[in-house]
Structure formats: C-alpha cells, structure tokens
Image (cartoon, coloured by chain):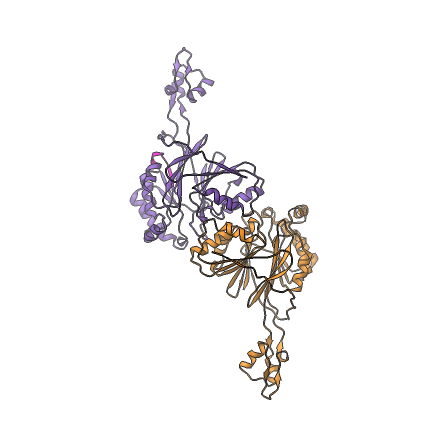
Chain colours: A purple, B orange
Amino acid sequence: MKIVFLGTGSSIPTKKRNQPSIALKYNGDVLLFDCGEGTQRQIVHTDISPMKIKHIFISHLHGDHILGISGLLQSMGLNKRKIPIHIYGPPETEEVIRSVMKLGFHTTFDIYIHEISTDSPQCVLDGEKYQIYSYPMKHSVPTLGYIFKEKKKPQLDIKRAMELGVMMGPDLRRLKEGYPVISKDGKKVYPEDVLLPPKRGISIAYSGDTLPVKGFGEFIRSLDCRILIHEATFDSTKEDHAIETMHSTIEDAINIGCIGKVEKLILTHLSARYDDETENYLREFKTLREEKGIDAIVAEDLMEYPLISKGGGNIGVNVSCHLKASKVIL
Amino acid sequence: MKIVFLGTGSSIPTKKRNQPSIALKYNGDVLLFDCGEGTQRQIVHTDISPMKIKHIFISHLHGDHILGISGLLQSMGLNKRKIPIHIYGPPETEEVIRSVMKLGFHTTFDIYIHEISTDSPQCVLDGEKYQIYSYPMKHSVPTLGYIFKEKKKPQLDIKRAMELGVMMGPDLRRLKEGYPVISKDGKKVYPEDVLLPPKRGISIAYSGDTLPVKGFGEFIRSLDCRILIHEATFDSTKEDHAIETMHSTIEDAINIGCIGKVEKLILTHLSARYDDETENYLREFKTLREEKGIDAIVAEDLMEYPLISKGGGNIGVNVSCHLKASKVIL
C-alpha cells in the first residue's frame, strides 16, 4: 500500500515534473487523483497496472489535470479491459469525458461518471474498505479536494473474551461483526465487552488546485487525516501571482497542514519555473518547515510513499454518504 | 535544419518510446508530423520551441497520433502565443480539434484547420521555401502520408555570366528571378544562358500508419525524396497481425524505401512489445538491410537527424497545389 506521485508539476510539464497525477495503491485497487497528459507513460515507470485502476477522482476540469484520461482509457481498451471504471469530478465532468471519447477511443468497458456538487463536503464513495470524501476548494473553476479514509474494523481482545467464557470459533467472528453471543456459562456477552478500538486507518487528503481554504484544514482534522498532499505552486516571492492565479504558496500549504494536524504534509504542483530554481524553493520550504514544526516533504515525480495502518482509535466522522447520481456511457 | 524524433512508439507508450510525433526544424520554422500524448513533454527535452510550431500534419485521427495536440495548444495559450497555427489532417479533423478544445483549452491565437481529401495525392501547402504533399495511405481509418519538399532556386554560373558580359550587380538578381538582361555589349542574355540546375533540396516522406502502399514508393521517387520515414510496427513473425491491424513489417518498409530509391530510410512506430525484444527486431532489420542493400536506421526517441541541401538537379513535380478549404476556429 503506497502513494505513487506520477506527476508533481503544474500546468506546463518540465524535464523533472509531469503534469498532475497521484496514484494510491490500496489492497490490489488503484485510485487515481487527477490525470494530466502523459500519466499513462509515467505509470509505465512504476509497478502500477493501469487495468487495476478502479476510480479516477478529478479535482477540476483544467487540461493539465484531465488530458491524460483519454489516452489511459484508450490503452485500457486496446488491452481489452472489461471491468468498468468510475470517474468522479465536478459538474460538467460528463461532458468533458464525452469529448475525450471522440478522440479515437474504442470502448470495451463501461464508464460511470459521478458528478459531485461543489456546494458542500460530502461522502462520494462508500466502499467496503474505504470511503472517499469531497471538499469544495477555491480555484478559478469549480474544484474539489478529496479525502481517502480507510475503514477499520474493531479489534478483538481475545484475553478478555476468554475470561468472559466466550467459546472459540464462530462466536468470535459474530462479536467482531457486532452481535452478542452466549458464553460457556450461559451469560450474554456483548461486542462492547470484548472489542478494542480499531487501529488508526490510513487517511489521506488531496487539495487539488486551490487558494488556501482554512475550513479544509479543519475538515481533514475532523476526519483524522494523517497525510495531506497539498498544492504549493509558488514560493513567497510569487505571492501576488499565487492569489491572482488562485494557487497556494509553500506557507499557505504548511498552514493548512498545521490546522489539519497531519502527521505528514507532502507538497506538490510546483510551478515550471522551479525546475531551474529548485534551490530557492527548497530553501524557503526548509525554513518554514522548521519554523512551523511540521513534518513535511516536497514530492518528486515517481516518488513512492508507503502506507501502514497504525494503533490508536479513529475519530468519528459525521458526514453522510448520499452521492447517488451515476451514469453509464457506452 | 534537422528532424527530431519525438515519439517512435505505437499505440501504447513504453519506457523507451513515446507515442508518435516527428518535428522538422527548417529555417526557424517547426513542422510537426503527428502529435501523440506527451509530445509537449518530449519537446522539453529538445531545443525546439513550441511557439515556433507553424504547421501540424496529422496522418490519421487515432488517439495515439493526436492526443498531444490539446495540451500543446493549451501550453501555447498559457505562454500567450499570438501567431496562428495551421493543422492539417484527413476529413473530420475539424470536429476532433473542436472536441480537443473543450478540454480546458484557453485560446489566445487562431487555429486554421485544413481537411485533406484521402482520394488522391495533392499539394496541401505551397510555401515560399517548401511544399507539402499528401498521399492516401491504407489503414483502418482514412490516413495520409506527407512529403516535405524544399524549393531550391537555380544557381548562377558567375563565370559564364562574366564571359557573356553581364554587368555585376542587380542584373544578376534579375537573371536568378527569371528575367533576361542586356549585356555590356548590348546583347540580350537569358536566364537559361547562365543558370545551373538548382541544388538538390531537402525532401522527406512520412508514411503515417499504413499497410505497404507500392504507389507511395513510386510517388516519393517522382518527388525525388531523399529521406523516407516509414512505419515498421512489426517484424516478420507478426506479419499476420500486421495485416490484421493494417500496419507494415520491417520488410514492407524496406521494400517501399527500395521502390522510392531513397538515400536514407528511417523506421519508426515500433510496437510496444519491442521494448523488451529490441534485439529480435534489430536482428531482422540488419539482415534485411544487408540483403536489400538499403541505407536504413531505426529511429529512437529524441534522435536527431541533420539535414543539408545537396548538389544535383531536382526532378520535376507534376502535382498541382489546389487545397483551398481552411477554417478559423476562435
């Protein structure tokens, strides 16, 4: 389980950085966050199988975040993919994907489009093992941040279960599944008698392109996010330009990481100018990281970040999952 | 002046080969032949300025030959390009470019679309210094090969002009431009009295994706083509697959090069399978090259091939230039 940074640049690709895309390998599935031009070729340099991509989450409909979708879908078709793919994005995603499909794409599988409102946060995918939340960000077009949240089952306190006379075997599974059982002594044992809090699951937030949004920091904190991948297109000398183009500076991203109290902040979406001025960017980054006392790194293309579930309880989440609209394009 | 091979792979990109695109740098202009996904990033690794691209020639409307156009145009827009760009392709090119433009592209310049009939060969661009011809090829969709042909002016035989008493100065230019002049002795001197045949210009043919087309070899010979860039997707062990998918084998391409009597044959569009089996491909290529006695190489990504005009006369061309239809999209 890991995050693979496929493209860590911004609107124009450079020698060092391709246009934005981040893959999350989780239990055999691959989730893609944005899909800039050339993403399928970046994937060739990793151990990711494009055929395992189940969900693509688009932050916004700017070309540098979506132009890789068409080629990726086409290659899946050439490889005779049969399983469907789900694409999530802001309103008008369907129209854009329909345009994409005119560019020589031969479909061999179903594509489900999920258009997500940018009015308020919501749960957009409630899977067996994880959930995905969206959060409205602030960019020149409707933009969404996304949060991946692993679902963790409670852990059984075997020692306590034995003390209470629970019979080994199927009863242990029943307790884990939330049902009470009868002990060897004929007493009723309830799940809460023998269950420990679940391990702290993997939880990752991704900002997309955005001005700093304070509420996003608070939202990811409420979701107990451990990792925040935040855009930091510019350094402080380009602050005016960041505001004008509706992007974040290094300091903006670090501030959101601090509000979110994340364990690890990963900066991405660096302006093309930093290919030649990496040192300037990194100097400011290191100074600010020190000042704010945050654990942070700057992403690089093809960098992999390993993921592990940890001890400690999950914080409750009170966002309901109600995304219903999905469409099939044939 | 050179050819830069930006992408020498086929439908699916590999570690070694990006999807098809070839740039021709000629006297400050750049001409692009096909534009697969990721072409703009390949360009970053060369000395080509995307802003100098004046003409894009699309062989056919399959995704792997066109998916780079959108990002390339978008980056030109982000760099505030003002000068127009001309895109040439088979029928329906306009519709495809219109779809491309829905993908987040902000236009700052005019785009002229030139749709070319695939019924017969024609001159599709008659510039001051060069012409471009199209030739109908045989693929699963309407496909065009293209020929770049440099225009060379006749050379003046100064010694002969002096013998005939031509006055130095403007009269020499008049003769070069095709007008007669009066000599020091009052005699009329005609251009044909003092002009040598022009140098042999640069002339390059590109096949696009195609089954071998014998007439194409003969056509490029009639145009005195010195260089042929021909697709050779498969080796002979995949001949059935080549026919089925309407591509050429190494031998097919070499045969066309022999018919065309080109000085240099450059093979491109290698199937993704040869990334791991390069040796098999090259073994057959070298054997056939030896057998057929042709000067040939296999293109690689970012390979540059220098171009020079040579001595020796041009062979006459009897294809008329009549492409009129052009449209502006704003």
Question: From what the image shows, is residue A18 above or below residue B220?
Answer: above
In the image: residue A295, left or right of residue B247? left
Question: From what the image shows, is residue B24 above or below residue A158?
Answer: below
Which region of the structure is painted magenta?
A220-228
Q: Name the residue: 59% across, 57% down.
A: B116
Q: Position of residue A12 (x, y in %)?
A: 44, 52
Q: Quadrant of the N terminus of chain B?
A: bottom right
Q: Nearer the viewer, residue B298 or B197?
A: B197
Q: Position of residue B285 (x, y in %)?
A: 65, 53
Q: Name the residue: 40% across, 49% down.
A: A270
Question: From what the image shows, is residue A177 above or below residue A9?
Answer: above
What is the residue that sits farthest to the right in this orientation?
Answer: B291
Q: Position of residue A66 (x, y in %)?
A: 47, 46
Residue B174 location, quadrant:
bottom right
Q: Position of residue B289 (x, y in %)?
A: 67, 56
Residue B217 location, quadrant:
bottom right
Q: Name the residue: 58% across, 72% down.
A: B153
In the image: residue B1, left or right of residue B139? left
In the image: residue B94, left or right of residue A2? right
Q: Nearer the viewer, residue A327 or A248?
A: A327
Question: From what the image shows, is residue B109 above or below residue A303?
Answer: below
Q: Is residue B257 visible?
A: no
Q: Is residue A70 magenta?
A: no
Q: Is residue A226 magenta?
A: yes
